[in-house]
Amino acid sequence: MHLSEEIGSRLQEERRRCGLTQLQIAEALGIAKRTQANWESGTSDATASYLSRCAGEFGFDVPYILTGLRTTIAADSLSQVEDVLVKQYRCLPEEDQRAIRRYLKALADAVAAGSN
């Protein structure tokens, strides 16, 4: 397997890990579905700006896509449940992530107010 195919395969793996279809990615990022398919098959190479957007909007592990080595958030410091929650959060659209952050802040504020 050539490097482009390996990267494409891991790109596809990340998309599936986040529960997204090629069409969902294409529509969210304003690219053609065929372009997404070509990048995943290794027919052509994904751009750096595309990979950056995938990381920011969907939580793709770009170092993994490029190298095959998974990155972790201080894996030793997270419980298994916390690790799953972080991965699920990263797969959500930005709008949903903002809603979760607002909810958690309100919940934490309510708990803090009740403690006083």
Image (cartoon, rainbow, N blue to C red):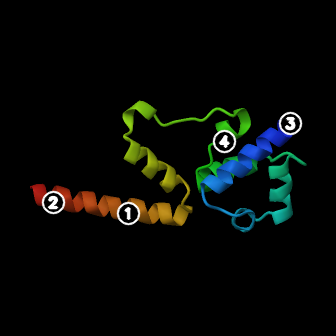
Examine the rendered structure and indicate whether residue 62 appears above or below residue 102. Answer: above
Helix, strand or loop at label 4? It is helix
Helix, strand or loop at label 3? It is loop
Q: Amino acid at mark 1?
A: Arg
Residue 114, given in percent of the width and then of the height, sits at 12, 60
Q: Amino acid at mark 4?
A: Val
Instruction: For label 1, count other residues whose C-alpha is less than 10 Å away and answer few (under 14), some (14-19) or many (20+).
Output: few
Residue 70, given in percent of the width and then of the height, sits at 60, 35
Sequence-wise, which precedes: disc 4 or disc 2?
4
Q: Kindly report the distance in space between the C-alpha atoms of the residues bearing marks 1 and 3.
A: 45 Å
Q: Amino acid at mark 2?
A: Ala
Sequence-wise, which precedes: disc 1 or disc 4?
4
Q: In the figure, residue 1 lies in which quadrant?
A: top right
Examine the rendered structure and indicate whether residue 21 appears above or below residue 58. Answer: below
Q: Which mark is residue 1?
A: 3
Location of mark 1 (residue): 102
Between 33 and 5, the one lying in front of the other is 5
Quarter occupied by the C terminus: bottom left
